[in-house]
Structures are given as C-alpha cells and as structure tokens.
C-alpha cells in the first residue's frame, strides 16, 4: 500500500519530548513557521520539563498573537501523556484548560492512532518505544523513527505491518537519514523503474565516530568509568545511547536497523570509522559511485528531514563552513576491541527473535554499568552470552517478542548477579 504524500501543516505527536531527540524536535517544530504543529507530547517521569515546554509554547503563542493576531490555543498541544507511574502529577496542575493530560502507556498507544495526528515522532528510548511505534504504524501513520530499538526488536514484523497498513517508517537516526537520501540515487531517471534500480546497490556504509574510546587499548577498556563513557566526543545525547556509542553497540543496533529499514542483507552493510562525523553514511552503487550525505553533526537536521519528508525547508541546524581547511579521516573498525560490530552483523543476519533478545540484554547491561554493577568491557560479551542461551525463533509475534524481551532481561540479571 503506497501512502500519498502528506500535506502541510502536519500535526505531530512528539513521544519522549523531555529527551534529547524530543527537545530537538520541539526546536524544529518551533522554527517551522507553522508547517509542523505539535498535537501531543509524552514524557515518562520528567513532568517538570513537560510543564516548562508548555509554558514556553504558550509564551511563543502570546508573542505570535501580539504580532499576528493568531489564537494562542492553536499552538499548544491538545494532549500530554505521562507514562511513568511515579511521575509527579502536581506540576501539571494549572495548565491551560484546552490541554488534556492523560496517564499510562495504553493511553499513549490509543492516542497515537487518532485521526488528529499525522506524524508520530518516536523518540522514546529503548524497548519501551516499541508498542507506541507499533500502534502508530498499525493505524497507518507516518512515524519519524528515532527509537531504533523498535526496529532492532521487531524489524521484520514492523516493516511488514507498514506494508499492510500504508504506515511509513522514516528514519531519524542521522546515519539512516543519510542512507535514505543516498538510496534515492539508485537511478538517475526521473521516474524510478524499481525493477531496474533495485539491483544497483553494491553496499551501504554506515559511518561511526568511534566514540570516546576509539584509540583506547583493550587493557584500558577494562577500566572505563561511567564518567568516561558519558563523554561523547561529538554528540550530546541521552545516557543509554551515549553508552551504546562508547561500546559501539549503537553501531550494531544501526546495522540491524538498516537491515530492516532498507531490506538489505547484513553482508551488504559495512562500517567505517569517521571521527569528524561530517559524512553521516554512504551508499556504494554497482557502477562504483559512492553517494554520501554531509552536514554538521546536529540532530535537528535529520529530525526535520523526517518530519517534512520528502520536502526540504530551511532548518535551524548548523551549516557546513567551507571557508577553512578540513580533513576527513576514514578507517576500518577494530573488531577485536569493539566486538559489538560482528555481533550486529550476526543478529541482522539471524533476524527472528535474535534482535529482541540482544536488545533487552544490552539495555539491562547498560543499566547495570551505569549503576556500577557491571564493568564496561563486559556489556557486549554479556549480550552475546544471553543471545547464545536463547532458543531461536524465526517468526515470533509481537506478543512473543515482548515475552522474549522480559526473559532476556531476567537472564541478563542472573548472569550479572552470578546466579546462573
Ligand atoms: N539523542 C540522539 O542524538 C539520538 C540520535 C539517534 C537516535 N536516537 C535514539 O532516539 C531514542 C531517544 O534517545 P534520547 O537520546 O533522546 O534519549 P533520552 O534523552 O534518554 O530521552 C528518552 C525519552 O524517553 C522517555 N522514556 C524513558 N523511558 C520511558 C518509558 N519506559 N516509557 C515511555 N517513555 C520513556 C523519557 O522520558 P523522561 O525524560 O520523562 O524519563 C525521554 O523523554 C533512542 O532510541 C536513541 O537510540 C537518539
């Protein structure tokens, strides 16, 4: 089912508005001159951030009203959803009466299906983002997908579901946004003849900054502290993805994400370390041409690209400065120091239940590392151990994936506590 191109203004639900992706998305929406309208925001626990976001929007609305005579309520979201049970609800008292506050994951999954929403920005971190992403795709929505874990867990199911419902998955990850754009060069014809263009892709090349430990020895990697791991050299992101970037598990998750998003076999996905993070990924075609997307590392650009897809508009993102000498370095990843990458290829090739198990093991291991209960260099090996100990299932349902997620968390905890 092919979806017709959405018109503007687009009504956007921002899931995870208190996070790094969510905050950047709100900046993009605020700068969109009305092309993008926020209709729903969700947070898990940070209701104080949510309340402040509403105050800021109201303030901008009042300014706009003074300048243009526009109605203030038109720029405020209609719904706020708080999914965390223990979140402080009191800070949300006294919001404008047109803004309705709802609670719980079920309410979120219900609302993202509503006809008043065109595009869902899936910016929740971890497996917690799967069910709302699923609900949006099931309802045939366009999903601007930052929550890569949803595709890692259920890539095969989600992409099949999108084909049935006409839902669209547009990547927000900068690498996949770059690939989506480069892949549109499969043919130079104005009208794509897909049967001819299909085979033109030789491989896709995901770039990786290499993270904070790019040059560290195996010995040094044994003594990484939480503080070390949370210092990413290029990107400012949430804690989980920052640790994933340090182990290069983030690149493993991106291999799996690319495998499902672009329906490309794992063996055609390569990784190259590119510390400057200016080239966000590349596609090599069978004729030898390589098409890359280049821009400053600034998530506001791929977020906007996804929200306004397939159109381009001026964006608040930082622009390239070509007035001074710059160098681009590329080199192959060290698979011995960073075993997450071969693990990513392996899981992408296996499909089925492998992604859900590795993802849950990784989330549990990262939490244990952040709580100083697990050494940094054990995160990836633990994921591998749990993956190998599960009974592989080639075609799990969504329900089964969620069960496997719970099973893998318990298994990982057992290994961490030494109770297996
Ligand atoms: N940050 C980046 O630059 C970047 C780039 C590419 C892809 N991504 C992907 O985007 C996603 C978000 O990353 P992030 O860096 O923005 O993370 P983050 O800063 O930690 O924000 C996570 C968001 O998810 C919400 N959340 C946490 N647990 C939840 C749960 N159980 N149920 C519902 N909502 C929950 C948080 O709410 P509270 O704040 O209220 O807890 C917050 O709004 C991740 O999948 C990440 O891999 C991020």
Image (tube, rainbow, N blue to C red):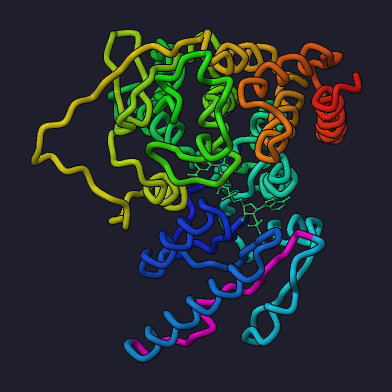
Q: Horizontal and vertical percent for residue 47? A: 66, 69
The residue under the point 35% across, 28% down is 182
The residue under the point 29% across, 33% down is 278
* 309 vs 56, nearest the viewer: 56
* Left or right relative to 326: residue 158: right
* 360 vs 32, nearest the viewer: 360
Q: Horizontal and vertical percent for residue 81? A: 70, 65
Stretch in magenta: 68-84
The residue under the point 40% across, 22% down is 193
Q: Horizontal and vertical percent for residue 397? A: 83, 29
The residue under the point 55% across, 61% down is 12
* 247 vs 56, nearest the viewer: 247
**Residue pushed farthest left?**
323
Quadrant (top left, top right, bottom left, bottom right) of the C terminus: top right
Q: Give the number of callouts.
A: 0
Whether residue 186 is visible, yes or no, is: yes
* 276 vs 61, nearest the viewer: 276
**Residue pushed farthest right?**
419
* Left or right relative to 383: residue 78: left
Query: Image height check: is 89 above or below 331?
Result: below
* Residue 99 belongs to magenta span: no
* Residue 83 belongs to magenta span: yes
Query: Image height check: is 229 above or below 347?
Result: below
Whether residue 293 is visible, yes or no, is: no
């Amino acid at each position: 089912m092919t979806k017709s191109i959405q018109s503007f203004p687009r009504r956007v639900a921002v899931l995870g508005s208190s996070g790094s992706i969510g905050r950047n998305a709100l900046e993009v929406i605020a700068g969109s001159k009305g092309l993008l309208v926020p209709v729903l925001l969700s947070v898990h626990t940070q209701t104080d951030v949510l309340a402040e976001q509403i105050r800021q929007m109201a303030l901008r609305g009042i300014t706009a009203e003074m300048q243009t005579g526009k109605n203030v309520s038109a720029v405020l979201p209609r719904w706020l959803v708080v999914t965390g049970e223990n979140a402080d609800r009191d800070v949300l008292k006294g919001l404008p009466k047109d803004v309705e506050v709802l609670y719980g994951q079920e309410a979120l999954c219900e609302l993202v299906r509503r006809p008043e929403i065109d595009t869902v920005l899936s910016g929740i971190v971890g497996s917690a983002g799967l069910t709302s992403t699923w609900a949006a795709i099931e309802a045939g929505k366009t999903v601007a997908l930052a929550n890569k874990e949803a595709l890692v867990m259920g890539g095969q199911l989600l992409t099949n579901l999108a084909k049935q419902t006409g839902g669209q998955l547009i990547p927000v990850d900068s690498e996949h946004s770059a690939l989506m754009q480069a892949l549109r060069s499969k043919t130079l014809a104005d009208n794509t003849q897909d049967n001819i263009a299909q085979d033109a892709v030789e491989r896709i090349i995901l770039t990786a900054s290499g993270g904070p430990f790019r040059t560290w020895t195996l010995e040094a990697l044994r003594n990484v502290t939480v503080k070390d791991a949370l210092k990413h050299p290029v990107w400012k992101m949430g804690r989980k993805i920052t640790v994933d970037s340090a182990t290069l598990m983030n690149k493993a998750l991106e291999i799996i994400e690319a495998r499902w998003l672009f329906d490309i076999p794992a063996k055609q996905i390569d990784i190259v370390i590119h510390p400057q993070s200016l080239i966000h990924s590349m596609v090599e075609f069978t004729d030898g041409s390589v098409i890359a997307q280049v821009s400053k590392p600034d998530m506001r650009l791929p977020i906007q690209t996804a929200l306004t897809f397939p159109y381009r508009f001026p964006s608040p993102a930082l622009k390239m400065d070509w007035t001074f000498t710059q160098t681009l370095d590329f080199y192959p990843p060290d698979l011995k120091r960073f075993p997450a990458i071969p693990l990513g290829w392996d899981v992408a090739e296996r499909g089925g239940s492998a992604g859900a198990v590795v993802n849950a093991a990784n989330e549990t291991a990262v939490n244990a590392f952040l709580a100083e209960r697990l050494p940094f260099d054990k995160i990836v090996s633990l994921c591998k151990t749990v993956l190998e100990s599960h009974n592989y299932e080639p075609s799990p349902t969504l329900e089964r994936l969620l069960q496997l997620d719970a099973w893998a968390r318990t298994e990982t905890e057992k290994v961490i506590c030494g109770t297996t």
